[in-house]
Amino acid sequence: MPAELPDDGTLDLLATARYGYRRLESDRPLRSGALSYDCIVCVKQVPDTANVAVEAMREDGTVNRGALPAIFNPEDLNALEAALEVREVYGGTVTAISMGPPTAAEVLRECIYRGADQAILISDMRAAASDTLATGYILSQAVRTVGKCDLIFCGRQAIDGDTAQVGPQLAEKLGVPQVTYFERFVALDGRSARIRRNVGNGWEVVEAPLPLLVTVLGTANEPRPPAARRVMQYKRARTIDELAREVEAEMPDAPDERREAEQARRLELLQMNRLVLPRWDLDEINADLQWCGLTGSPTKVHRVQSIVLTKEGYTQVPPTEEGIRRMIHELIVDHTLG
């Protein structure tokens, strides 16, 4: 059953003004259009927050990402699956984009293994410490650099921040409509999309024009596994940075000229087999540096605390003023309360 929604048109006007879509009354399928659709999927490599150890926190309270295993952000996998399903039904292309350090190329290979046509890494030291606003801006410049795009897919949120802000901010920077909490397409018809979205206690069906950005829920679909044939075909795909590090690790004592020659030889082989993963810096996407990295990030973290639960069982507090006073004192001593 759909959620109960107001019938006075308030929600329709609010949705149209804020997000660029129109609420509809049912999920009756529309006629499928003959157009194909070029899709972009924004993916992220994140620390596995399900396996947090004491070493994950530095003494200064920041996250030691090197102590945590890196994984594909779960809901980004659902976003990728949604884009691949569009291509399977309607035709078109799927391009994966990730912003991060050179190691983020691993999630881009995962995208290709699952069926993405192209994968691009946005990596630049000047983008370090970007908050969601700066990240949304940088990704918007990357999308513009890719060019033609009908649908942009993002996971609802990343597990390392849980803000759910990057997708909506990206849509705002691009000036395109957005539909959040995507469950499935009811239909794509020419230059519009009819979408079923989750509203917490039910669902609603909305219609929006293309180009369009959607943020995808983890319950929207079941991501496909990597295809063995594509793994074998693309497992040697590398960015230039990865190639340089591999050559340096294998030839640590060789002179620079010899390493450069070996790197050029391997790069030529990868290019012949279309196995080079593009790596763009901020200059290549024409980013304004004042909106990137720490300079372009107004978010300031006041404090990060690592709460470690070591005590077993429970403590019974007497329901008296003195009992509550002792409990508060213990919580302050344990730094549970500041």
Image: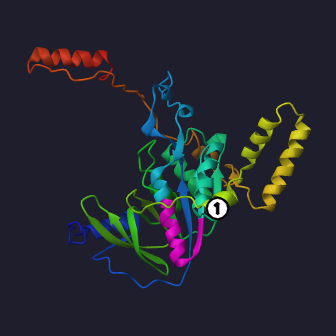
Q: Which residue is mark 1?
A: 230
Q: Would you say 319 lies left or right of 141 here?
A: left
- Indicate the secondary structure of the residue bearing disc 1: helix
Which residue is most to the front? 228
Magenta span main SS: helix
In the depicted view, which residue is nearer to us: 313 or 288? 313
Quadrant in which residue 249 is drawn: top right
Residue 244 x/y as whole percent: 78, 43
Please say whether residue 219 is one of the residues in the magenta stretch. Answer: no
In the depicted view, which residue is nearer to us: 244 or 24? 244
Residue 203 x/y as whole percent: 29, 66
Residue interval drawn in magenta: 79-94
Residue shown at 63% from the left, 45% from the top: 289
Residue 60 x/y as whole percent: 50, 23
Name the colour scheme: rainbow
Where is the C terminus found, in terms of image quarters?
A: top left
Residue shown at 63% from the left, 54% from the top: 109
